[in-house]
């Protein structure tokens, strides 16, 4: 009979499609990963992976059993959780994928508040892109995700966390630095620093530009960067202007490296969500964390805004 440790090795190898990376995740040697896979293949006379030198791909059989293997591991996890928590103590591990920059500022305060009450719960946070969060939620390699736009998927439920304002910032030496506001059309005249279109912040921005009859394709984009920190640094260096999360810009605003300029008719906000896979069974730690956020999100959001006000002038 196949054992859970072999299944765990198979699932990890299937997710990585690389035995070396799977070994690193599992804290095993690469040969141990290969031996576990080969043990299953020999026992059932099947091929789980197609090997091409150092690269591997799931075979048809491997693709067929992967979702079943994940369900078995999840059931075992829930069973183990019930046994561990039989005495009424909440413990276990929660894995969170974060795909929003402002969420990175929210998470430390959230985890500090949660783990003060539930000291036996371990949390592991991965900073990644939105699609990786969605995939991780669906294949159960992640317990929860934090995203900048609501996920429209029948197998995922969303819980609002907090609202983040989207503001325009310019270099401190910019001609607009002493102005309080500009018109939307004025933005088209300025060198603009953009992020990739998958950014939640820029989806909000582009929607508002269209409402004002402005085609986002007409922005004078001088550079496109995939990371919000890089965008902010580019503004600091005087390369151009941008729209960015107010949470993200708080430190640079406080240090006077950039200036916030209002745009007439633009009151942009971005809702940040906590997401999870719809399921009849969650570990006690996962259920407790979800409920904790529901009950405390207003207070946590207020604390985040208080901290921003404390370091941001004006």
Image (cartoon, grey):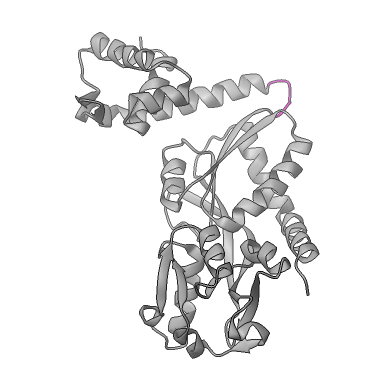
Specify the quadrant of the image occupied by residue 215. bottom left
Whether residue 1 sits left or right of residue 104 in the image: it is left
Determine which quarter of the picture holds residue 166.
Answer: bottom right
The answer to which quarter of the image holds residue 81 is top right
**Most prominent secondary structure in the magenta stretch?**
loop
Which residue is drawn at the image coordinates 39% and 16% (left, top)? 6
Depicted 42 relative to depicted 127: above or below: above
In this rendering, is residue 62 above or below 261?
above
The image quadrant where one finds the N terminus is top left
Residue at the image point whose x is 42% and y is 46% from the top: 132
Of 136 and 244, nearer the camera is 244
The quadrant in which the C terminus is found is bottom right
| Image location (x, y in percent) of residue 85 | 67, 23
Res. 69 visible in picture:
no
Q: Nearer the viewer, residue 280 or 61?
A: 61
Please give the name of the residue rendered at 74% of the width and 54% of the height, measured from the top-left corner.
300
- Residue 164, image x, y percentages: 63, 65
Q: Is residue 88 magenta?
A: yes
- Nearest to the observer: residue 100 or residue 93: 100
Viewed as shown, does residue 173 lie left or right of 11? right
Q: Which residues are magenta?
A: 86-90
Q: Is residue 224 magenta?
A: no
Query: Do we see residue 55 in this rendering?
Result: yes
Q: Nearer the viewer, residue 281 or 269?
A: 269
Q: Position of residue 282 (x, y in %)?
A: 56, 35
Residue under the point 52% across and 73% down = 242
Residue 213 screen position, x and y as percent: 42, 88
Q: How many marks?
A: 0
């Amino acid at each position: 009979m196949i054992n859970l440790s072999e299944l765990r090795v198979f699932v990890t190898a299937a997710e990585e499609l690389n035995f070396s990376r799977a070994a690193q995740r599992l804290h095993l040697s690469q040969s141990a990963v290969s031996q576990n896979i080969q043990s299953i293949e020999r026992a059932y006379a099947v091929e789980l992976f197609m090997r091409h030198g150092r690269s591997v791909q799931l075979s048809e059989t491997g693709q067929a059993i992967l979702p079943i293997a994940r369900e078995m591991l999840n059931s075992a996890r829930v069973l183990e959780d019930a046994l561990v928590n039989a005495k009424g103590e909440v413990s276990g591990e929660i894995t969170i994928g974060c795909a929003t920059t402002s969420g990175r500022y929210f998470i430390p305060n959230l985890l500090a508040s949660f783990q003060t009450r539930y000291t036996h719960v371990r949390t592991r946070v991965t900073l990644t892109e939105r699609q990786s969060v969605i995939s991780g939620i669906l294949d159960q390699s992640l317990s929860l995700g934090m995203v900048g736009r609501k996920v429209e998927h029948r197998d995922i439920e969303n819980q609002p966390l907090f609202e983040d304002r989207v503001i325009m910032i310019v270099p401190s030496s910019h001609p607009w630095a002493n102005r309080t506001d500009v018109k939307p059309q004025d933005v088209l005249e300025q060198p603009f620093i953009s992020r990739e279109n998958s950014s939640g912040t820029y989806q909000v921005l582009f929607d508002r530009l269209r409402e004002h009859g402005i085609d986002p394709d007409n922005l004078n984009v001088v550079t496109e960067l995939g990371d919000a920190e890089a965008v902010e640094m580019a503004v600091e260096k005087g390369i151009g202007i941008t729209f960015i999360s107010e949470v993200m810009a708080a430190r640079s605003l406080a240090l006077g490296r950039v200036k916030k300029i209002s745009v007439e008719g633009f009151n942009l906000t971005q809702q940040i969500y906590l997401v999870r896979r719809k399921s009849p069974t969650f570990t006690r730690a996962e259920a407790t964390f979800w409920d904790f956020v529901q009950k405390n999100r207003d207070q946590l959001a207020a604390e985040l805004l208080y901290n921003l006000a404390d370091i941001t002038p004006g």
